[in-house]
Image (spheres, coloured by chain):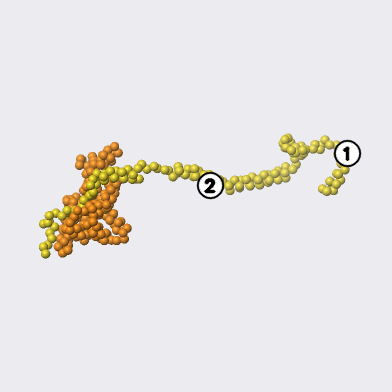
Amino acid sequence: MTPFKLDSEPKIESGFKTPDNYFENFQTALIERLDNEPSNKETKVISIFRKRKTVLFAVAAVLALALMIPAVYQSYSKSKDLDAATIESYLTEEGHLNQDEIISEIEPESNIIILDTKEIETQTLEDMLASNPNIENLVIEN
Amino acid sequence: MQDEKEFIFSLLNPQTQNQAFQRLMQEYQKPLYNHVRNIVLSHDDADDVLQNTFVKVFQNLKSFKGESKLFTWMYRIATNEALTFLNQKAKKSGISSVELQNKAIDNLKADLYFDGNEIQIKLQKAIATLPEKQQLVFKMKYFEDLKYEEISEIVGTSVGALKASYHHAVKKIEAFVTTD
């Protein structure tokens, strides 16, 4: 058997062929593909923050309101307590106020009817009580 | 090709890019096709790989720093694309790269775009017995007539090592063809 010698033989070609006009068509196909490649198109940048701006604002508002609830509740209940305490201590400490001073503190448009007892004479009072037949029953009930 | 730096500049300039890229394709599509076809063997696969290669070249032009020649850089991309393509194809088919290559050689006889005789098929079978790097060196030297210096830049191996590699490849091929 004669040993095969690559260099002494005529060059062996690869034998590979291409379809007719392959290289002309290749350029067209490639340019088309490059135009459609997503990475070659101008990328539209959509800001996550901008897209969800409304949602973010809504969430922020809800959170702010939620955080405010304990503070508001505490302040409200505290002011209510204060009012009651203030009134109580006021009445206790300022109990020496006379009738005129109390009347002067009441707003004129308030619905409180104040009887000017000063002007009522004893005789008139007795007459009023005598003319009212139910007064006895009212006194017994109370 | 005109001064390479000037040409790269025209490839990066949006106003001249399309024209320059068409020139690049005209210049390199045939040698790169042959390079890829020698690795993947089938025309359809070579077509896919060549397209991927040019897409990668186009997309990475901005990052090309000119440290190597444009030619070397493109050959390197083409080689990587072809080898990755074969590995992925073998993985998808559930067979080894060697089995895939032998299958591709068996299909050559029926390939419309292969005009080879018995000795050419025998040579492909002999090449398939070589380690991957030796195959690559042999194909680039024997079929593509590249210089050792050029191959050295593409595969990143010294010229001396390439010469040794080619020498071993030739010996193994001769032995295979003689005994087959």
Of the residues under marks 1 and 2, which one precedes in the sequence? 2
Q: Residues within 10 Å of mark 1 (few under 14, many from 20)?
A: few
Q: Residue B85 — which label?
A: none
- Residue at 11% over, 64% down: A1
**x and y, in percent, of residue B144 in the image:** 18, 51
Q: Secondary structure at mark 1?
A: helix
User: Relative to A53, is B68 on the left or the right?
Assistant: left
**Is residue B30 shown above or below A122?**
below
* Same chain assignment for discs 1 and 2: yes
Chain that the image shows in yellow: A
Mark 1 vs mark 2: give the one in front: 2
**x and y, in percent, of residue B126 in the image:** 19, 60
The chain containing the residue under callout 1 comes to A
Q: Amino acid at mark 1?
A: Asp
Q: Residues within 10 Å of mark 2 (few under 14, many from 20)?
A: few
- Residue at 30% over, 38% down: B14
Q: Residue A127 — which label?
A: 1
Q: Secondary structure at mark 2?
A: helix
Colour chosen for chain B: orange
Q: Looking at the rendering, which quadrant does residue B131 occupy?
A: bottom left
- Residue at 72% over, 42% down: A94
User: Relative to A49, is B174 on the left or the right?
Assistant: left
Residue A54 seen by the camera: yes
**Is residue A105 shown above or below B96?**
above
| Residue tagged 2 | A63
The chain containing the residue under callout 2 comes to A
**x and y, in percent, of residue B103 in the image:** 25, 59
Q: Looking at the rendering, which quadrant does residue A110 occupy?
A: top right
